[in-house]
């Protein structure tokens, strides 16, 4: 009978075939596991509750501005303090003067029951340690206005405060502290969230600097003025000398969607 080939070749062929089947099985298993992981990764939707795990990117974007259009609706006026607001090729530039808080209303006026507001900006390197920027949510008018401010300063200090009766009222500091986020030439995102709870009295307040959650507290109001929150850009400055903030992105999201 003719020779059927070497036994070594047969063994090598069998081993190679088995190895190929193992590789294919592993590949199929990896794909299957990956698909299962994708299918079982929950997407955060729906209203925020008292214990909901909240991330910086939660919610549907309802307003976004990169300040490329000088007609997008932000103020270009100067305040009595001398603080100025203007569009430039680099972004929305605010030169802040005095030991004051300054506000610029976002050109989005639809109230949001659970709102996230974020600002990405740089701050002049010589800014006093008390100067900084952040966001503010509010609802109601005049004496019935309720407002929460979220601020991070050049030194990394932060505060969450409350105002009853408008921007000219003295803020009540709800919580303060220090984080590793410092403002300067590198853009930093500061984000504040105001989420009205289902009982219409509790308000969950969260502050992020970049991806770091630095505050998560709950406040209460006996009667909320309206059905939703509106958004402001906020800055704080020092009379030591002027500070300049260049805003490159501002965003409003609906946390419940």
Image (cartoon, rainbow, N blue to C red):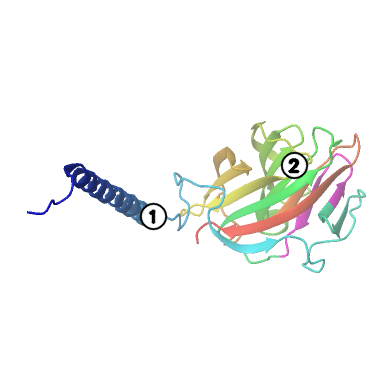
Report whether residue 166 is seen. no
Q: What number is the disc on residue 224?
A: none
Q: Where is residue 137 in the image (x, y as percent from the top left)?
A: 66, 53
Disc 2 is placed on an element classified as loop
Report the side of 147 relative to 34 (left or right): right
Q: Position of residue 219 (x, y in %)?
A: 56, 43
Q: In the rendered picture of this protein, how many numbered marks are placed on residues?
A: 2
**Residue at figure coordinates x 77%, y 67% from the top left:** 72
Q: How far apart are marks 2 and 1 (CA)?
A: 34 Å
Disc 1 is placed on an element classified as helix
Q: What number is the disc on residue 186?
A: 2
Q: Position of residue 201 (x, y in %)?
A: 52, 51
Report the side of 82 relative to 40 (left or right): right
Q: How crowded is mark 1: few (under 14 residues within 10 Å), some or many (20 or more)?
A: few
Q: Quadrant of residue 207?
A: top right
Residue range highlighted in magenta: 94-107
Report the side of 63 relative to 201 (left or right): right
**Residue at figure coordinates x 88%, y 60% from the top left:** 77
Q: Nearer the viewer, residue 168 or 77?
A: 77
Q: Which of 35 and 125 is in front in this view?
A: 35
Question: Label 1, on which residue?
Answer: 38
Residue extending furthest front?
1
| Residue 59 falls within the magenta-colored stretch | no
Q: In which quarter of the image is residue 90?
A: bottom right
Q: Looking at the image, is mark 2 or mark 1 earlier in the sequence? A: 1
Report whether residue 163 is seen. yes
Q: Where is residue 243 in the image (x, y as percent from the top left)?
A: 86, 42
The N terminus, quarter of image: bottom left
């Amino acid at each position: 009978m003719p020779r059927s080939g070497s036994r070594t070749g047969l063994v090598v062929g069998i081993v190679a075939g088995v190895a190929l089947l193992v590789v294919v099985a592993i590949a199929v298993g990896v794909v299957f596991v990956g698909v299962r992981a994708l299918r079982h990764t929950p997407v955060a939707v729906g209203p925020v509750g008292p214990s909901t795990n909240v991330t910086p990117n939660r919610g549907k974007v309802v307003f976004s501005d990169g300040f490329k259009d000088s007609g997008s609706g932000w103020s270009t006026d100067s305040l009595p303090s001398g603080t100025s607001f203007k569009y430039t090729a680099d972004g929305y530039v605010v030169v802040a003067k005095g030991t004051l808080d300054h506000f610029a209303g976002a050109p989005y006026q639809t109230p949001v029951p659970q709102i996230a507001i974020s600002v990405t900006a740089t701050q002049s390197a010589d800014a006093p340690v008390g100067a900084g920027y952040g966001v503010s949510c509010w609802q109601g008018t005049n004496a019935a206005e309720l407002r929460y401010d979220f601020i991070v300063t050049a030194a990394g200090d932060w505060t969450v405060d409350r105002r009853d009766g408008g921007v000219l009222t003295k803020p009540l500091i709800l919580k303060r502290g220090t984080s590793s986020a410092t403002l300067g030439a590198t853009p930093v995102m500061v984000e504040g969230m105001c989420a009205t709870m289902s009982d219409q009295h509790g308000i969950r307040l969260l502050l992020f600097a970049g991806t770091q959650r630095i505050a998560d507290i709950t406040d209460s109001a006996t009667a909320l003025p309206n059905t939703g929150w509106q958004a402001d850009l906020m800055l704080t400055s020092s009379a030591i000398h002027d500070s300049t903030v260049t805003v490159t992105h501002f965003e409003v999201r609906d946390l419940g969607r």
